[in-house]
Image: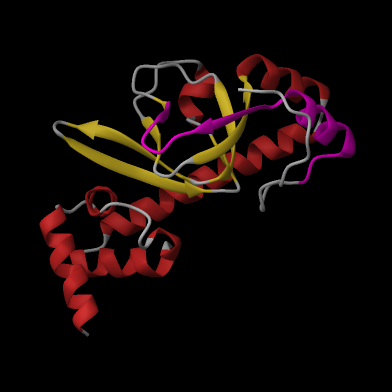
Amino acid sequence: MSTEQSSFVWPAGIPSPSAGLMDHLSRTMRIKRIPKRRFLLEEDEISNKIWLLEKGLVRCYYSRGDREVTTWFMEGVNIIVAMKSFCEQRKSKFYIQALENCETRYLEQAEVQYVLSRFPEAKDMRIRISEQYANLLAMRIRATSMQSPVARYQYMLRHFPYLQGRIPLDIMASFLDMDRRTLTKLRSRQKNK
């Protein structure tokens, strides 16, 4: 972890910070590289960081019995946060895991509170980040509420093309709410068309 002072790319869809806020973030955000398969957050931990994923791919999931259920994926450049745990400072029910080697920056809870009190535009950013997470969850519901496994798989191909070849089949199956064997059959049928 370091606090290198350097510029960084701001996520699309989030209002751009003022020069003052960008300068503050450049000075206070800590840089951390997270190796593939490592966790940004584990179940029963309290989330105390908001992450800027600059490069890489992460997923959020929870355990249902002996199965993992993936709720969303996020690739760089995006904001990563376990919203409920972070905002309420309660134990998380979710894991956030790096699926690739990731380059990140983060702010801890106290610094986020300072930014919200000192920079009025940060409140608009918080609203937009919340909207993005609501949209992710809506897409997840849409992906898994379709009647057939074929429809769910086709939805994923259309709406998440960046995942193809980047995630293991068992993780893709956990997102689509199907078992790996069903997904393998669907993929081979798709290739044979």
**Number of marks present in the image shown:** 0
Q: Is residue 193 magenta?
A: no
Picture quadrant where residue 180 is located: bottom left
Which residue sits at x=23%, y=38%?
Answer: 68
- Residue at point 35% right, 43% down? 71
Q: Residue furthest right?
A: 19
Instruction: State whether residue 148 appears in this view.
Output: no
| Residue 144 image point, x, y percent | 28, 55
Residue 109 falls left or right of residue 25: left
Point out residue 177 in the picture as x, y percentages from the top left corner. Answer: 22, 51
Instruction: Say if 190 sits above or below 165 in the image.
Output: below
Q: Which quarter of the rendered picture does the C terminus lie within?
A: bottom left
Instruction: Assign the N terminus to one quadrant of the image.
Output: top right
Q: Quadrant of residue 123?
A: top right
Pinpoint residue 150: horizontal percent, then vertical percent.
Answer: 21, 69
Residue 86 at what x, y percent from top left?
A: 52, 23
The residue closer to the viewer here, 52 or 94, is: 52
Q: Is residue 31 magenta?
A: yes
Q: What is the span of residues highlighted in magenta in the rendered image?
A: 16-40
With 49 as the anchor, is 46 left or right in this view?
Answer: left
Left or right of 115? Residue 176 is: left
